């Protein structure tokens, strides 16, 4: 830790609840971001800015012109380029003293175990139910934190699953997977850029609060945000046994999450 | 009691919230809601009663019940 380290993180070191101890926890943290779209871009920027020591980026997509209004890491001249490659370059330019690993592919039951192996926290910036159930199952099996975030028009949801002792999984809250075709995505229903930016930032905040032990409660909370009314509705749940939770890596490999959500 | 509708559920009810009485438990409320909004029977949501997700419970007149659907966008 040199003078530039203290200078870079000065404003968050000044926060008594973070301090040097919190900063060291952030530097030791390993967060994997799945999906580098509307949620993943702001989450990655703030996690990199905060000094999360190792950040993994997973996305097989290339940048499209209609991404730019909400995926604020990318520029017009980069249309057609790999999202994770461009994101890595931008994030490293912003904070060169952290490590960024990229996976230019989509997450699947076949690659999740290898890709996520070294990470403690998985932040879900995907836009598919099959991916959400897969990440939830993986985190339940490996006892990792699953940072859920999703948006629908002017509303968004955020929750930390497998947090602390509550052991509540996404699957235990929503045990009946909706058909992907029944729930419109941003590409079908449209979205203003602000909404995923707010929800992605909230996901990053929840991850940092967990890393630095700043969460005021160990109770499970599902946060529902409404951007039109600026209202937040919070709900809790009682842990229940998730009978469908995977018991081995083989359970994940042999489960068809696409069929489950169709 | 007050019923709150979120996300895709609002496009079925065309309302964000309403007062509805006559149900003494969650099962009765679900039947009442489906009678009022038949397409709700195909919708995917969970109930949150007084800010706690539950599958079944008794209901009182001053309870607040939210219908929470999962979202998928990112």
Image (tube, coloured by chain):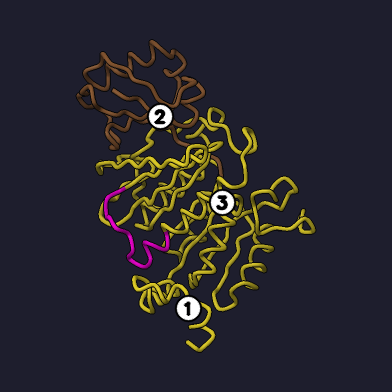
Chain colours: A yellow, B brown
* Discs 3/1, front: 1
| Residue located beneath label 1 in the image | A10
Mark 2 to mark 3 CA distance (whole Å) = 25 Å
| Residue located beneath label 3 in the image | A197
Mark 2 to mark 1 CA distance (whole Å) = 44 Å
* Discs 2/3, front: 3
Identify which residue is drawn at 57% across, 32% down. Answer: A184
Instruction: Identify the chain of the residue marked 3, using the numbered disc in the image.
Output: A
| Outermost residue, front side | A229
In the structure shown, which secondary structural element does the residue marked by tag 1 occupy? helix
Q: Nearer the viewer, residue A96 or A55?
A: A96
Classify residue B56 by image quadrant: top left
Q: Residue B11: horizontal and vertical position, in percent?
A: 51, 23
In the structure shown, which secondary structural element does the residue marked by tag 2 occupy? loop
Query: Which stretch appears magenta?
Result: A207-220
Instruction: Identify the chain of the residue marked 2, using the numbered disc in the image.
Output: B
| Residue located beneath label 2 in the image | B45
Horizontal placement of A193 versus A206: left or right? Answer: right
């Amino acid at each position: 830790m040199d003078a530039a380290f203290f200078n870079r993180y000065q404003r968050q070191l000044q926060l008594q609840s973070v301090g040097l101890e919190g900063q060291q926890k952030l530097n030791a943290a390993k967060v994997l971001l799945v999906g580098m779209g509307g949620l993943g871009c702001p989450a990655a920027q703030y996690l990199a800015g905060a000094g999360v020591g190792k950040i993994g980026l997973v996305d097989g997509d290339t940048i499209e012109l209609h991404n730019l209004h909400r995926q604020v890491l990318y520029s017009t001249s980069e249309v057609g380029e790999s999202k994770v490659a461009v994101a890595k370059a931008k994030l490293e330019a912003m904070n060169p003293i952290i490590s960024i690993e990229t996976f230019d592919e989509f997450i699947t039951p076949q690659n999740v175990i290898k890709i996520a192996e070294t990470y403690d926290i998985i932040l879900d910036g995907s836009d598919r139910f099959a991916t959400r159930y897969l990440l939830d199952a993986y985190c339940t099996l490996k006892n990792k934190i699953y940072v859920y975030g999703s948006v629908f028009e002017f509303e968004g949801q955020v929750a930390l699953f497998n947090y602390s002792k509550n052991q509540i999984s996404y699957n235990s809250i929503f045990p009946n997977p909706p058909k992907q075709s029944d729930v419109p995505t941003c590409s079908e229903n449209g979205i203003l850029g602000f909404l995923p930016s707010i929800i992605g930032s909230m996901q990053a905040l929840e991850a940092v609060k967990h890393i630095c032990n700043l969460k005021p409660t160990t109770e499970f909370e599902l946060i529902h945000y409404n951007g039109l009314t600026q209202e937040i509705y919070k709900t809790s749940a009682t842990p229940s046994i998730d009978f469908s939770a995977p018991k081995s890596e083989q359970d994940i490999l042999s489960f068809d999450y696409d069929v489950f959500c169709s | 009691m007050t019923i709150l509708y979120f996300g895709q559920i609002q496009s079925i009810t065309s309302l964000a919230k309403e007062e509805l009485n006559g149900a003494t438990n969650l099962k009765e409320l679900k039947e009442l809601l489906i009678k009022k909004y038949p397409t709700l029977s195909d919708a995917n949501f969970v109930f949150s009663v007084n800010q706690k997700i539950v599958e079944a419970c008794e209901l009182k007149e001053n309870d607040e019940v939210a219908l929470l659907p999962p979202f998928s966008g990112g």
